[in-house]
Amino acid sequence: MQLLPEPIRRLAAWCVVILLVAGVVYIGIQVCVALRPAVVPVLLALLGTALLLPVHRWLLRAKVNRFVAAGLTCVAVLAVVGGAVYLVTVALVDTWDQIVASLRRTVRELADRFGASGTSLEDLAADALDLLGRFGGTAASGVVTGVGVVGQALGMAVLALLLVFLFLRDSDRAVGTLRSLVPRGSADTMEAMARRAFEGVEGFMRGTTVVALIDAVFITAGLLILRVPGAFGLGAIVFIGAYVPYLGAFVSGTAAVLVALADRGFVIALWVFGVVLAVQVLEGNILQPMVQSRTVRMHPAVILVALTSGASVAGIVGVLLAVPVTAAAFGAVHELRTRYAGAGGPPTGGSDEDS
């Protein structure tokens, strides 16, 4: 080894470190995937705690008991989420027939344009029913699997809500518990890394909530001006979708355009598309940099890679958790870099300045 040049030895050392870290990360991801029903509620609960902790602190400053404050916070979450789900459901129910009718008109126009005017939707439906009859067993098993997935998702949601309650109630003991689990020599470093990681998640959730609220208000106002039905429900979809960067905006914008197309026609749908696009441009260039300027900021390329990785590992849940987990990792790495630079870097304030 001594015969190799110094740059080659450093490169080899870094390769070994990278391989070891990659191996540990890979094993950790596989363990998390295997224990997904337990890991996902914990991560969701941490996100919820980071978002709701300011409300809990405000209640504590108002001399409310910790147990009662945690309970009131969770009840408020249930009320908000339930209201959003209700608005979205009402919007979809009220406009579903119109959306189907619009899609029927679109299919007929496309069929006429491409020389398939003799093919009706009834023929397509008959073919679909024939295929369903041939593969009925597969379809039935798929329905059973879907019901199982929904039940598992509801169970994880209930567990996550209970964990949010416990995390809020016992938030004053978090630091002591963490320090008791690590060796004394590294307790300060681990506490600083944990605080920085949680601050990254808290800042991301808080900033995303503010931006989501502004997006929902502007898009809802535009839909009301254009007299699109279900404007408040679509605004709720926009608010929820904002927690998934890029993908959420695309899905919520598509829903708004479809509803406008169904009820008001092609021209109003174009106006709705323009409103959604303008709000997204305003968000990406002004709101996000301004609101999240004091939190962990990540390049869009990093966010896209994180979303892709999260989707490949855990599907929709992975997409939801990818960016906050990456923000926490960025915060912890930044804290390590700061401590390493402060300990091993050149001393600040030399004798020339003191004299």
Image (tube, rainbow, N blue to C red):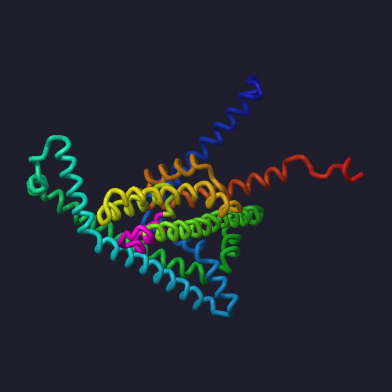
Q: Position of residue 199 (x, y in %)?
A: 58, 57
| 90 over 24 or under it: above or below | below
| 64 over 118 or under it: above or below | below
Q: Residue at x 48, y 60 (%)?
A: 46
**Quick one: 84 or 260, which is closer to the camera?**
260
Assign the N terminus to one quadrant of the image. Answer: top right
Q: Is residue 18 left or right of residue 184?
A: left
Q: Is residue 266 left or right of residue 72?
A: left
Q: Is residue 225 left or right of residue 265?
A: right
Q: Residue at x 58, y 78 (%)?
A: 62
Q: Is residue 226 magenta?
A: yes
Q: Is residue 219 magenta?
A: no
**Quick one: 131 or 336, which is closer to the camera?**
131
Question: Based on the displayed image, in which of its 4 quarters is residue 38 positioned?
Answer: bottom left
Residues shaded magenta: 224-241
Q: Position of residue 173 (x, y in %)?
A: 57, 68
